[in-house]
Image (tube, helix red, strand yellow):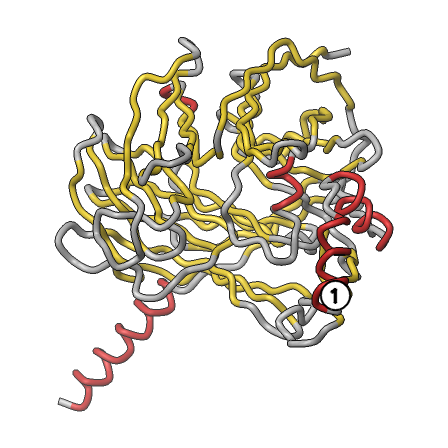
Amino acid sequence: MKVKILLFLLATSLLVSCEKAINTTNQINDTDLILNEAEIIETKVYKGILLGVNFDRNEIYVQNSPIGENTYDIEIIDTKEEKTIKTLKLRRGDFQSPTDVYSPSYMQFLNNRYYIIDQFHKILVFDQNLNYLHTRMFKDAKPRYFIDFFYRGGNAFFVIGKKHFGPEESKCSFNIFKIIEKKKMELYKKIHESSHKSNNYTRRTRNVIKGAIWASTWGFEKDGKIYFCNGEEKQYYVYDLDLKNLECIKVDFLKGKKLSNKDAEKIVYDIYKSGDVYEEIKRKHNMTYKFISYPGIIYYFGFYDVGENELGIAGDIDLERLAFRLDIIKIDSKEYVESIWLPIGHAFLRTLDENYTGLFQNEINIDKGIFVYTDYEEENGEFFVKLLRFRISRK
């Protein structure tokens, strides 16, 4: 009997060890950058906030808030026909209601279903004709850096980079959840955890220091693998859902950038043009705001699924010309391909704010030559979605 127990324990330990992540390291070598021109050939503007895209279906999802109405309107816009093909009206309400929404924050089409997240609290599911199916509540509110739904083995899942605020560091836990109809969502897999410096902005004081340009975290699922990164690390990670191993890819051509506090002030005062708001707060409430940049080097200013067998890294920013450098690499060969400069919009800079919680999207597809993001009109205080079509002029 003791032998049988020993063999059982040995077999169990081997099984557990096989389930553990296998950390391996690969490398994308240092190289001279190939800077090609991204020529903007068309610009389309839609009123509202970008909730998501589906490039395969040529759809973008734009949330609008009609003045005087008690609904959120989500328009499904066909980017080929350049028109709204469907509109989903959601009644405004609170977090507890299964069908009312407090504030839609993300939308994705997957396996003939539309998934809509209400702020950080619940997921509403609709069929392809926008008929309501069911709602799944999060166990707790999930402020996030990113979220992405995917489908495997007859079930829907999502990977989330959950944000954990802290006085000295902000942590991000990378977890996969499984969505089972008529059941609660369950944690499927903990992948990894990373952190970067925090600015202790949660402390209560009349002198408030805000990180206006900060290290962040990005991630998504693509072809059975989870890709994610921490902006202060010169590498990204790949979790294989089949092999259940975690791979680390070092990116040697990324040099990183240390920004100054003047850069942070430029974003607030010159780009956002919101310095007068803080002056008014100071006058009324005797509160002083100071804006700073991340104290360390930032290697990633964005990380994107940009097309078939391609990843995109926002490896540099230029605040004078308001543009970011997109570095494109091949997934299979782990080779650098080329770089292009694309314009910086409101959503791009919001992802670099220390307080960012995943509510603004930037989406790029190199194969289709599309860049879509949320921007902001300072004069009338309105959000709008900008869709750029571009072609790459290669030397």
Residue closest to the eye, 334 or 380: 380
One can see residue 186 in this view: yes
Residue closest to the eye, 354 or 334: 354
Q: Position of residue 394 (x, y in %)?
A: 73, 12
Measuring 16% from the left and 41% from the top, which residue is drawn there? 133
One can see residue 296 in this view: no
In this rendering, is residue 65 above or below 22?
A: above
Q: Position of residue 359 (x, y in %)?
A: 50, 46
In this rendering, is residue 227 above or below 287?
A: above
Number of dots carrying numbers: 1
> Would you say 71 lies left or right of 235 here?
left
Q: Position of residue 384 (x, y in %)?
A: 54, 29
Measuring 44% from the left and 15% from the top, which residue is drawn there? 79
Image quadrant of residue 270? top right
Question: Mark 1 belongs to which amino acid?
Answer: Ile
Q: Pointer 1: what residue?
A: 209
Outermost bottom residue: 2
Measuring 82% from the left and 31% from the top, which residue is drawn there? 32
Label 1 Cα crowd, 10 Å radius (few <14 / some 14-19 / many 20+): some
Measuring 20% from the left and 26% from the top, which residue is drawn there? 129
> Would you say 279 lies left or right of 354 here?
right
Residue closest to the eye, 45 or 171: 45
SS for dot 1? strand
The C terminus, quarter of image: top right
Image quadrant of residue 196? bottom right
The N terminus, quarter of image: bottom left
In this rendering, is residue 310 above or below 250?
A: above
